[in-house]
Amino acid sequence: MDAIDFRTVDLNLLAPLRVLLVERHVTRSAEKLGISQPAMSASLARSRTLFRDQLLVRGAKGLVLTPRADQLLEQLDHVMAVIGEMVSLPMEFAPETSQRTFTLHGNRPVAATPDGDSGDQGLDPAFRCQSQQTAPL
């Protein structure tokens, strides 16, 4: 599969498209996004061109998703969740619950014990005391 040239893809269509596919109503979707109904209609028209599919078609009870739109909705849910994680603030570091492993490097000599373990003997005593209180092994 060839790489997509993202310069030719309007990624700004994805969020309105997801709202349209969930709401299945152009005016309600526009209101939810705080844009005009004509702007939402234009977004739908551009999305139809981008995906080469009608996406929403008139049915007996209003707009109905095409099979391609059904597939896109599932993918858009995933993409929006990933983007949400990417732009959300990172969690504050909590040393007492962290499962991360850290390797410390320094320029102080470290004396090894007879069994070959250097332990934390080369660490500054104040750091060693503080780290044992906040992040015990």
Image: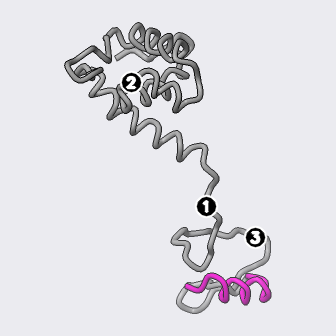
**Amino acid, disc 2:** His
Residue 117 falls in which quadrant of the image?
bottom right
Separation of residues labelled 3 and 2 (CA atoms): 62 Å
For disc 1, the marked residue is: 91
Identify the element where label 1 is drawn: loop
Mark 1 crowd level (few <14, some 14–19, many ≥20, 10 Å Cα): few
The one of 112 and 36 positioned closer to us in this rendering: 36
Residue 43 image offset from top left, x and y in percent: 49, 15
The label on residue 25 is: 2
In the rendered structure, are the residues bearing label 3 and label 2 in contact, judged by CB atoms less than 8 Å apart? no
Circle 1: residue type:
Met
Q: Nearer the viewer, residue 103 or 108?
A: 103
Residue 110, how many percent across, how many down?
71, 81
User: Neighbour class for label 3 at 10 Å: few (<14), some, many (≥20)?
Assistant: few
Q: Nearer the viewer, mark 2 or mark 1?
A: 2
Residue 106 numbered mark, or none? 3
Number of the front mark, 3 or 1:
1
Residue 130 in magenta stretch: yes
The extreme left residue here reads 60
Image quarter (top left, top right, bottom left or bottom right) of the C terminus: bottom right
Q: What is the C-alpha distance between the residues marked 3 and 1?
A: 28 Å
Q: Earlier in the sequence, mark 3 or mark 2?
A: 2
